[in-house]
Amino acid sequence: MNMSSPSNPDCKSARPSLPGLLRLLRDVLNPLALYRQRPTRADDAATALLAGKGVRFVQRIYRLRVIGLGVGFFCVAAGFVQHPVAWPLWLLLVAHGYVWPHAARLWALKSRIPYRAERRNLVIDAAFGGFWIAALQGNLVPSAVILSMLSMDNIAAGGLRLFMRGLYASLLAGVLGWWLLQAQFQPQSDLNTILACLPMMALYPLALGQSTYLMSKKLAERSRQFEIVSQLDGLTLLFNRRYWESLLLGEFERRRRQKPADAQTFLLLLDLDHFKSINDTYGHLIGDEVLRNFARLLRTRLREDDWIGRYGGEEFGVILRDVLPGEALALSQRVIDAVRNRNDENNLYGCTVSAGLVPFSPDMEAHFVWLQRADHAMYCAKESGRDRLVVWHPGLERTQGAPNQAPPPCCARPAGDDSTKTMDAKKADVFGAATRPL
């Protein structure tokens, strides 16, 4: 079914409805709704869960506030020179420009939830801005600079909701200041006032842009780290099954597009023999150690270009890319021999390895067929005595369902094995290898 069809209920729910947009607009324009608790939001979660959160946010805003208010002092001061004011306003301006940034930082850091406290401080900044606009008697250039810089701060720190909080605070403080100071509207700005505002217009956006860039850079790095973690198996630090199979699918498609060449891609599946007895005898902690040791052995014995993943519990997959057939066979056999001749560094507590090796073939319809063939070869190695490598060929599939048929040469038991058990390769449908659980 076409997922973009209007009949799809998921698509309907994903589209913003007109009532939802109206409700959002109402909440933004309603001052009371802006301060209403929203328990479904992370920033309105239980106080105990948010205690101590937001210290880096406070530090980032502190640096911007020091620059903005320090440079903005001259912008407002020029307006006060153009239209003289009483000395208490000068004293308040000095305190706001050079004392308030440090007091706001200390206040926020001493609060139980620094993040919320700093958002409150930003609203206070906006209220101060409205008061200075009133004290400047509407002097156009400094008023516009103050309003735009404060709006830029609030949008960057808290989006539309914090912007509207700051806007309402500015309007309220502006009206109150206009009434207290008995201000008269004088919007004209002289040349000195305009020149004093230029540093604010030039420096503060640069500081805000630099802060935003550094934050974006950290987020990008954190995103890359999360992406890497999501690709790895937590125990062995090899690729996990989901990501490894995506690499196999990509390699399968690449090989289908390319013309045949001497160098091929091989799929190697390996299974630790008697691993269950390790868990039963020594416990799961030792079993985990065996898996980590085996993963380390694979990394040291194979090439850097080979993609190694943990396919199942004690099963591992390797994609040998751009390798000659003889080299692929030698690499695979080297792993089998290394496990058999293990040392103290890679102690596998007596485990050996059964492995199946399959070259890419154009006749495979999908990548899971490749996996299925490797699965058949690996279980053929197990049924023929374990601790060996089996290279897949069409004869392996023909033996399925015919337990009395003699096994093909690659599956023959070693000399001296008097077991009368005949080979019975694992039966699986076309999805068998690709869907066995982790």
Image (spheres, rainbow, N blue to C red):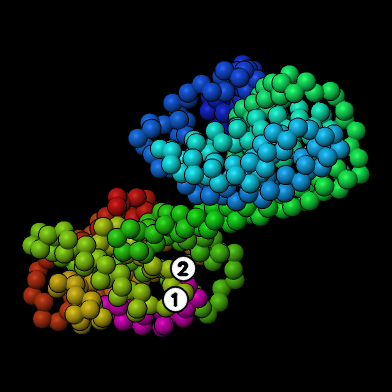
Q: Where is mark 1, residue-wise?
A: 304
For image coordinates 44% across by 26% down, the residue present is 39
Within-10-Å neighbours for mark 2: few <14, some 14–19, many 20+: some
For image coordinates 77% across by 40% down, the residue present is 76
Q: Point out residue 409 in the picture as x, y percentages from the top left corner.
A: 26, 76
Question: Can residue 133 be seen by looking at this rendering?
Answer: no
**Which one is nearer the viewer's eye here, 155 or 242?**
155
Q: Where is mark 2, residue-wise?
A: 360
Please give left or right for residue 169 compared with residue 104 in the image: right
Q: Is residue 17 above or below residue 373?
A: above
Give the residue type that dot 1 points to.
Glu
Q: Quadrant of residue 286?
A: bottom left
The circle on residue 62 is none
Please give left or right for residue 117 compared with residue 287 in the image: right
Q: Residue furthest front?
A: 87
Q: Is residue 324 magenta?
A: yes
Q: Quadrant of residue 420?
A: bottom left
Q: Is residue 140 magenta?
A: no
Q: Point out residue 248 in the picture as x, y percentages from the top left corner.
A: 46, 61
* Marked residue nearer the N-terminal end (1 or 2): 1
For image coordinates 77% across by 42% down, the residue present is 77
Position of the N terminus by quadrant: top right
Q: Point out residue 104 in the picture as x, y percentages from the top left corner.
A: 54, 41
Q: Quadrant of residue 186?
A: top right
Q: Is residue 109 above or below residue 427?
A: above
Q: Secondary structure at mark 1?
A: loop
Q: Secondary structure at mark 2?
A: loop
Question: Can residue 22 be seen by looking at this rendering?
Answer: yes
**Mark 1 and mark 2: span between their CA atoms?**
20 Å
Q: Mostly what secondary structure, the magenta segment?
A: helix
What are the residue bounds of the magenta stretch?
A: 321-336
Which of the two discs, 1 and 2, sits closer to the camera?
1
